[in-house]
Amino acid sequence: MAPASTLNRDILRLAVPALGALVAEPLFLIVDAALIGHLGLVPLAGLGIASAVLQTIVGLMIFLAYSTTPAVARRFGAGDPSRAVSVGIDGMWLALGLGAVLAIVGWFATPALVSLFGAAPEVTDQASIYLGLSMWGLPAMLIVFAATGLLRGLQDTVTPLWIAGLGFTANALLNWLFIYGFGWGIAGSAAGTVVAQWGMVAAFVVVVGRLARRHTASLRPQREGVRGSARSGGWLFLRSLSLRIALLATVGVATGLGTDELAGWRVGNGSIEPLDLT
């Protein structure tokens, strides 16, 4: 049995980079809120509604990370890295499929989703613009979840940290360029974030592709592996659903108070909302 000091070092080696990657996620929305805030209260209030809907959808899919990690870790710990990588790739395929469906349905459903909050017409318009464009980043967000789970299962928490950091930097730069350089307003923020998210997917695909070649793992989806990832995430889905219902209730209350209050809610809640995903 390894001494306690060695175990502690191993835990810190894995936990510290993982914490850094988790911190990077909320920073995406903080940057959006900061940049959009300079456009005025109405766009910021619109972001409050749009981000609540978007994070609810994404939050319900967090099982893609937390079901993939143990599935990969079990195979890796059993001395079967090829199967471990294959299981993680199955999770990524599941994420792509779910994300594509959610993106298409979500894009068509955006007006109805936003109207549920009963905000002022100008706020509803801004929320619809941001949410509609952001829907096309959903597949990327879910693939990132699954790929992160794969690498964590292989005891690699450093690579997701680097990719998250690069994604955050790209997001900030692209948002500034699209919002102010191109004059796209709130649409620029959504577009910049979507581009940054797909850039993160490209980085993960390169990393996972190398792992697949190294361990001779299949890049094709395996039906049983995809089903297993979906089944194991059921309880996590229910847990996330209950948390998200509570958060949506706070958005409804803030919307009912008025545009100023909703904008203030976005600023105050922007740095903590995604943390329930952990």
Image (spheres, rainbow, N blue to C red):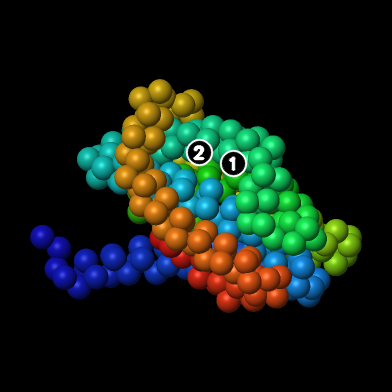
Q: Nearer the viewer, residue 97 or 37?
A: 37
Where residue 61 appears, as percent x and y from the top left, is 47, 46
Relative to residue 91, is residue 220 depicted above or below?
above
Observer able to see residue 24: no
Query: For the residue marked with disc 1, what is the amino acid?
Result: Pro
Q: At 10% from the left edge and 60% from the top edge, which residue is drawn?
A: 1
Residue 246 numbered mark, or none: none
Question: Residue 82 occupies which quadrant of the picture?
Answer: top left
Q: At 70% from the left edge and 67% from the top edge, which residue is drawn?
A: 45
Observer able to see residue 125: yes
Query: Is disc 1 surrounded by few (<14), some (14 to 19) or many (20+) residues within 10 Å?
Result: many
Q: On the image, numbered disc 2 is attached to which residue? A: 95
| SS state under label 2 | helix
In this image, 10 relative to 45: left or right? left
Where residue 173 appears, as percent x and y from the top left, is 74, 65
In this image, 120 relative to 117: left or right? right
Q: On the image, numbered disc 1 is attached to which residue? A: 139
Q: At 63% from the left edge and 35% from the top edge, which residue is drawn?
A: 105
| SS state under label 1 | helix
Q: Please state, as top left, top right, bottom left or bottom right, where the C terminus lies in the image.
A: bottom left
Question: Residue 118 occupies which quadrant of the picture?
Answer: bottom right
Query: For the residue marked with disc 2, what is the amino acid?
Result: Ala
